[in-house]
């Protein structure tokens, strides 16, 4: 059974309370429940983890090696700043899909550049909570095609 890591970065623990006009009313627990249920319905497993600090996210990416078959990663604001996360993704031999709830390209200019997109397999943004289920479908498609 394919195993996916659903990795969320800084401030995403505040989903549901944080800028609901942009991020919606679903909490992180809601997002994780939907992701786990969706993976299960596709015959796979989703394991969820959130951290606010960059180093913990680097550690989680390293730990995904040999444990998971792919990662759906919402790096939050570190998307736009973090070379460490770029290097961590580049250093693990796993498909990683960059995920955003909001359409970052329709927002402030500082959100238009991603430091991690270059080393991700693809990017999904702007679909609200569905960005995660779309990323799961994309990852499972890739994993299936590799078999
Ligand atoms: C986000 C977009 C980022 O620009 C922002 O810093 C976030 C959330 C999103 O899911 O839309 O924290 O990654």
Image: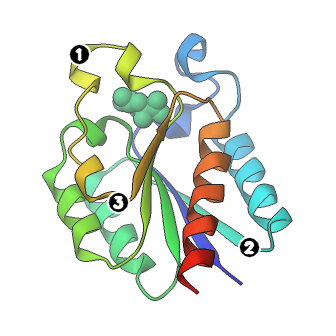
State the image coordinates of residue 116 (x, y, percent, origin top left).
26, 50
- The residue carrying mark 2 has its beta carbon less than 8 Å from ligand 1: no
Q: Residue at x 21, y 57 (%)?
A: 86
Q: Which residue is mark 3?
A: 57
**Residue that appears at 59% across and 69% down:** 4
Residue furthest to the left in view is 83
Q: Between disc 3 and disc 1, whose residue precedes?
A: 3
- Pointer 2 or 1: first along the chain: 2
**Quarter the N terminus occupies:** bottom right
Q: CA distance from mark 3 to mark 1?
A: 25 Å
Q: Residues within 10 Å of mark 1 (few under 14, many from 20)?
A: few
Query: Which callout, 2 or 3, points at the residue further toward the start of the chain?
Result: 2
Q: Secondary structure at mark 1?
A: helix
Q: How far from the left and from the top, in percent, is residue 93?
A: 34, 79
* Residue under the point 58% across and 76% down: 145
Which residue in the structure is indicated by mark 2? 44
| The quadrant where residue 30 appears | top right
Is residue 142 or residue 94 the one in the foreground?
Answer: 142
Badge 3 element? helix
Marks 2 and 1, how far apart at CA: 37 Å
Residue 135's x, y, as percent? 58, 52
User: Which numbered dot is residue 109?
Assistant: 1
Residue 122 in the image: x percent, y percent? 41, 51
Q: How far is disc 2 from disc 3 in space, using C-alphas? A: 23 Å
Q: Residues within 10 Å of mark 3 (few under 14, many from 20)?
A: many
Specify the quadrant of the image occupied by residue 127. Answer: top right
Q: Quadrant of ligand 1?
A: top left
2 or 3: mark nearer the eye: 2
Q: Is residue 33 left or right of residue 139?
A: right
Give the mark count: 3
- Disc 2 to disc 3: CB gap under 8 Å: no
């Amino acid at each position: 059974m394919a195993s996916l890591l659903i990795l969320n970065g800084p401030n995403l623990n505040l989903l549901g309370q944080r800028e609901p006009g942009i991020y919606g009313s679903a909490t992180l627990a809601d997002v994780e429940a939907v992701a786990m249920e969706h993976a299960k319905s596709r015959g796979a497993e989703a394991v969820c983890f959130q951290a606010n600090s960059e180093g913990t996210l680097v550690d989680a990416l390293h730990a995904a090696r040999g444990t998971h078959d792919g990662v759906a990663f919402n790096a939050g604001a570190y998307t736009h700043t973090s070379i460490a996360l770029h290097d961590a993704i580049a250093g693990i031999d796993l498909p990683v899909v960059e995920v955003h709830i909001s359409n970052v390209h329709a927002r402030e200019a500082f959100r238009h550049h991603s430091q991690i997109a270059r080393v991700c397999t693809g990017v999904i943004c702007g679909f609200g909570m569905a960005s995660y289920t779309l990323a799961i479908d994309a990852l499972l498609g890739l994993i299936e095609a590799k078999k």
